[in-house]
Amino acid sequence: IGVFAAVSAATAALIAGSPVAGLARLPDGDRKTLAVEHPGGATGCVLELDDAGNVARAGMLRTTRKLFDGVVF
């Protein structure tokens, strides 16, 4: 799943009555971390809400994994 699709799905979870909202389990608070699951795994999305409850910022969580050990001379 692409970045835009993951953030769009996470944002749709905040829209009452949307298909995604019916499936999502949303955490409390103004900063919400959601896992958007897909066949290849899960994509972490972070949404920050303003005082009116609108999405003010949206982003993704990225992680890295160790690829190899090496020695540089």
Image (spheres, grey):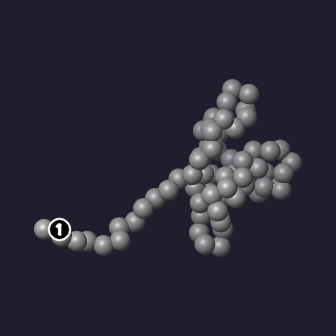
The quarter of the displayed image where residue 9 is located: bottom right
Q: Number of callouts in the render?
A: 1
**22 or 51: nearer the viewer:** 51
- Left or right for 64, reference 16: left
Residue 70 in the image, given as x and y percentages of width and height = 22, 71
Q: Residue furthest right?
A: 17
Q: Residue furthest front?
A: 73
Residue 23 in the image, given as x and y percentages of width and height = 77, 57
Residue at coordinates 46% horizontally, 59% vertically from top-left? Answer: 63
Q: Residue furthest top?
A: 51
**52 or 69: nearer the viewer:** 69
The quarter of the displayed image where residue 29 is located: top right
Residue 25 appears anywhere in the view: no
Residue 8 in the image, given as x and y percentages of width and height = 72, 52
15 in relation to 69, above or below: above
39 in relation to 17, above or below: below
Residue at coordinates 73% horizontally, 32% vertically from top-left? Answer: 53
Residue 12 appears anywhere in the view: yes
Q: Residue furthest left?
A: 73
- Left or right for 64, reference 2: left
Label 1 crowd bin: few (<14), some (14–19), many (20+), radius 10 Å: few
Residue at coordinates 53% horizontally, 53% vertically from top-left? Answer: 61
Residue 12 in the image, given as x and y percentages of width and height = 76, 50
Q: Please, what secondary structure does the residue beneath circle 1 have?
A: loop
Quick one: quadrant of the N terminus?
bottom right
- Left or right for 73, reference 42: left
**Three-letter code, disc 1:** Val
Quick one: quadrant of the C terminus?
bottom left
Residue at coordinates 40% horizontally, 65% vertically from top-left? Answer: 65
**21 or 52: nearer the viewer:** 52
What residue would you read off at disc 1?
72
